[in-house]
Image (cartoon, rainbow, N blue to C red):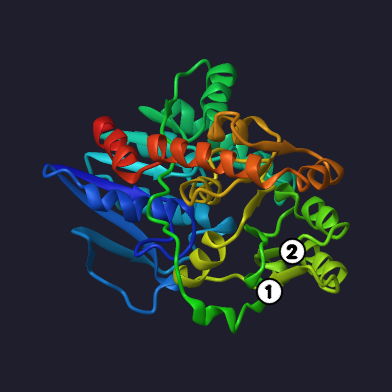
Amino acid sequence: MLHISIIGTAGVPACYGGFESLVDNLLDYTPENVEYTVFCSAKKYDKKLDTYKGAKLVYLDMDANGKDSILYDYKSMKMSLNADIMLILGVSGCMFLRKIRKHFCGKIITNIDGLEWRRDKWNFLAKKVLKYSEQQAVKYSDIIIGDNLGITNYVKQTYNTNAVLIAYGSDHVNKVTDDSLYEKYPFCRENYAVTVCRIEPENNIHLILEAFSQTDYPLVMAGNFDHSEYGKTLQHKYSAFKNIHLLNPIYDSHIINWLRGNAGLYVHGHSAGGTNPSLVEAMNLGLPVLAFDCVYNRATTENSCYYWQTSDELLSLLKTSSTKLSETGQKLSEIASRLYTWQHIAGQYNNLY
């Protein structure tokens, strides 16, 4: 029996982001010879389960994200010294891997996520710390996972190390039919574009809103606008436009999948990171996608959608014919069914064990 500790997420059942959804779905395909322990943030869960989908849950009274994630991950590692494998998701605590290696005889698999140190939201010192943690992750892990061809190529070029390419699944998302929701979201009765993301500069929210402010095309955007001055400024500037509907974060999967699945277009502005969960989920829904032009998005979509880098370019793409957009949605749906199913993703992880 292989005892595997999963380190670096807020926990399961998934209630936060991409890594949490990854773990939640991995547990559906647990091999008979594997026992998982998943470390969870007690601050995220009012109801604390002992087990979930056969995995043992261990709660730490700490935040799993932000600066606290470093000690959260380190404590999880220290409590996993008797495991056969540590599956580490993200590099926050990897600055301590050299120390952990002195006491741990098992194997370490690390998914380095999306080159976190490059993200605009971090200050200079935070970027330095995250870059160092990435270096330590590559040096002291037995296997490095990159979720995108752009990430694996970066690891090869930067560290002369081969990383294993494993993306994210998307088939947990399905279209929802619920006419009652039109009462709350009447603007969704007409054809509209949708964007669901964190409101951060690297996601180019300002460019998306600027483009839609120059057209009558309806845009529904859900995100944490009140989380930063960047978001508050954009909300104040663009909420007055009749075709732009800015919503607070929606954590109800039924509602968010209804909003996405009934849209005619998905606009994806992410410029950092690797394979983004919201992008592959839109692909699974068969939505035409207008994506920011960067190596990660091109790799995820196999160069099969429309790309932009400026608000003017995005504005021009909004004039694309419905026939061409429909053809793009069909192509992206085929890619998602081939590459981004959880059975396929879980099988890749299971093969690594």
Q: Which of 82 and 21 is in front in this view?
A: 21
Tell me: 50 left or right of 295.
left
The answer to which of 245 and 71 lies nearer the viewer is 245
Q: How many marks?
A: 2
Q: What element carries label 2?
A: loop
Does any portion of residue 129 appear in the rendered image?
Answer: no
Res. 237 image quadrant: bottom right
Q: 139 or 290, which is in the foreground?
A: 290
Quadrant (top left, top right, bottom left, bottom right) of the N terminus: top left
Tell me the residue that label 1 is attached to. Answer: 187
Q: Is residue 39 left or right of residue 207?
A: left
Mark 1: few/some/many CA within 10 Å (<14, 14-19, 20+): some
Residue at 83 percent across and 41 percent down: it is: 310
In this rendering, is residue 223 above or below 73? below
Specify the amino acid type for callout 2.
Answer: Pro
Residue 128: where, in percent of width, then height?
67, 39
Question: Contact, CB < 8 Å: mark 2 with mark 1?
Answer: yes
Residue drawn 85% across and 58% down? Answer: 215
Quarter of the image where the C terminus is located: top left
The residue that label 2 is drawn on is: 218
Left or right placement of residue 124 versus residue 295 in this view = right
The image quarter in which residue 344 lies: top left
